[in-house]
Image (tube, grey):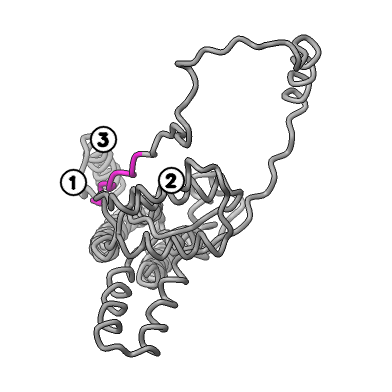
Amino acid sequence: MFNVLKEEFKANTLKMQQIRAVHERKEKEIRDVYAPGKIPRFLHEEEKNYKSAMKKARLDAINQLNASVKKIESAQGGMDSHIDTALLTELNAISASGLGLTASELKNIGQKVLSSGSAICARKLIEIAEMSGIKLTMPDPDKARSVLYECAEELLDFYKHYDGTAKYKTNMSIDEGKYCFKLNGKFIDEHEKKFEAATSSNLNQTKKAVEEAEEDKKEKTLENALNEFRKMVSTEDVPEQKKSDAAEFVKAYNSKMNPSNMPQPQVAFMRPSPGVVSKRVPKPKARPDLTYNTADTPASTAAKELSQKMAARTE
């Protein structure tokens, strides 16, 4: 779904580069053709035309970005905050048992969770997967939207500040140079990978396909639809964490000072309930303000007036 953002980025970047190239060519013509006394006035006029054209290009790009983000975020569905009580009870029972699940078992239960559309059940299953030493990836609309918004903010910043310079120059400032390094669009690819792992854009269609295949009793169609479910649930082993030297020292010290045969005081009310793990759910990222204020600020107005006065004096 990020292909639209990539295509727009490429087209808008090219447009800004063309505006810059035309501007530089006209500046050279002014210096080559006009008398020294008239050059400042004509350069001032050309600078105004360049900034006006670039402002329009920026505004067009940001309006395009806004429309594309709305289209992509509206496609996120199929998962919400409702609770599938029966499924959550089953998941809690698995968690409380302390028995780890295999990747195959997690995938099978993952399909049931996707069918339920319960984001809460999905979070519980991911927690069980972590306890089993397996990283489970499932559609998460909130996470997908957060990644989309992060990408949109980067694009917005680029469109607001990129000046159309096609190649990096050694005399550029850090702020100027960073936009040249983004011209290859790889930063969009990085966001796209994260988005594809979390997007639920095709979840509703897959659910509908499964239901229709079950009603029509078409085994081949049903198998194809179920395969789409399986693709949305992926697993990988979680690498073992490297042991901390400090933690090992503390462990050895405690063993020496408190031998295992000595009874250790326990405070019952501080013990967590079986199978309950306290976790803070990250708050979904808020939608960024994808607007571009084209109004002149007091500082820019004063600078414009000063530039006009300087140009008038040279005439």
Identify which residue is drawn at 68% across, 11% down.
263
**Nearest the eye: 28 or 188:** 188
| Label 2: element kind | helix
In the rendered image, the residue lying farthest to the left is: 295
Identify which residue is drawn at 35% across, 47% down.
89
Give how far apart the Cα atoms at labels 1 and 3 are: 11 Å
Front position among marks 1 and 3 = 1
Q: Amino acid at mark 1?
A: Ala
Neighbor class of circle 1 (other Cα within 10 Å; few <14, some 14-19, many 20+) is few
Do tag 2 and tag 1 residues touch (Cβ < 8 Å)? no
Asked whether residue 266 appears in the rendered view, the answer is yes
Residue 277, horizontal then vertical, whole percent: 46, 34
Residues in magenta?
283-291
**Nearest the eye: 62 or 306:** 62
Which residue in the structure is indicated by mark 3?
A: 299
Which residue in the structure is indicated by mark 1?
A: 295
Label 2 or label 1, whichever comes before in sequence order = 2
Label 3 or label 2, whichever comes before in sequence order = 2
Which residue in the structure is indicated by mark 2?
A: 93
